[in-house]
Image: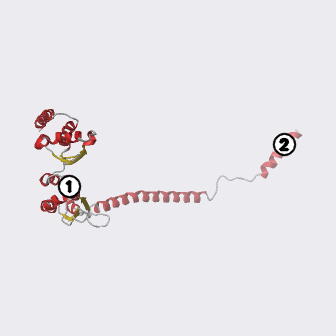
Amino acid sequence: MAHKSHRQKALAAQLEARPEISLVSTPAPLAAESSMDVDDAVLISSASTSTAPAEGSASASASASASAGASSSGFAPLSAAQQASVLKNEFRRVPIPPHRMTPLKREWVNLYTPMVEQLGLQVRMNVKRRAVEIKTSEHTIDSGAVQKGADFVKAFALGFDVNDALALLRLDDLYIDSFEVKDVKTLHGDHLSRAIGRIAGEGGKVKFSIENASRTRIVLAETNIHILGSVQNIKIARDAVVSLILGSPPGKVYAHLKSVGARMKQRL
């Protein structure tokens, strides 16, 4: 019993030594009120910030729609016609072979007239450099006018007639294909001469027949062969010329060209 009483006294002493804890504290309502104020402030600020992006997006869309017709510099965009009229200054120099300088001087009026009137280019003949110089002007409208003019002069320099080369200015699907006899077969001496003779024919009959059947124009300049026409027609004429170089008789080439011409008429 004495031992129990001693334990009870020790527990009582420990309980008395502990500080009293009150379950109700006075500053708690103030803290609750402050937390409520903070929550209300957070709610108000979040609501204001949620409405701000909506107003900002609406104003941004309105400003974007208002400035849709104006560029970043504040000026209205150019129309298609005005954009086409604004071109950079382009310059092109086309070299002329020495043996084509005399025909160039003879046909100079027929050469520069369509380039000046149709394309609005500035053209001059540089006799010292043996070249034709082409440059854009304020009257140039087409952005590809300089390239068309250069192709026109180059076709004349290769040996085509002015009227044939003029088609390059009027049509967009015409090209020039150039190759040599040695690209097809290596020939020397009389064999090379006979191959060129087979292509030309007596009085140029074979060449004219190929031109009429394939609707192209062919120029024989020694061992160089130039063909003017569309992609499909150039292929037909080139196949005929290659067959003649390889040794096919003209009669066989004529028969093939007739069959090809009949197929082309059926397609048309």
**Front residue of 212 and 53:** 212
- Which secondary structure, mark 2? helix
Outermost residue, right side? 2
Give me the disc on residue 157.
Answer: 1
Q: In the rendered image of this protein, does residue 263 appear above or below residue 27?
A: above
- Mark identifier at residue 241: none
Q: Is residue 143 visible?
A: no
The reply to whether residue 101 is in sight is yes
How crowded pointer 2 is (Cα within 10 Å; few <14, some 14-19, many 20+) is rated as: few
Instruction: In the rendered view, tell whether residue 3 sits above or below residue 51.
Output: above
The residue that label 2 is drawn on is 7
Extreme-front residue of the structure: 190
Question: Residue sitting at 25 percent across and 45 percent down?
Answer: 179
Residue 44 position in % (x across, y down) = 46, 59
In this view, 165 is above or below 210: below
Distance in Å between CA atoms under marks 2 and 1 = 129 Å
**Residue 10 versus residue 244: which sits nearer the camera?**
244
The amino acid pointed to by label 1 is Ala
Judged from the image, the secondary structure of the residue bearing numbered disc 1 is: helix
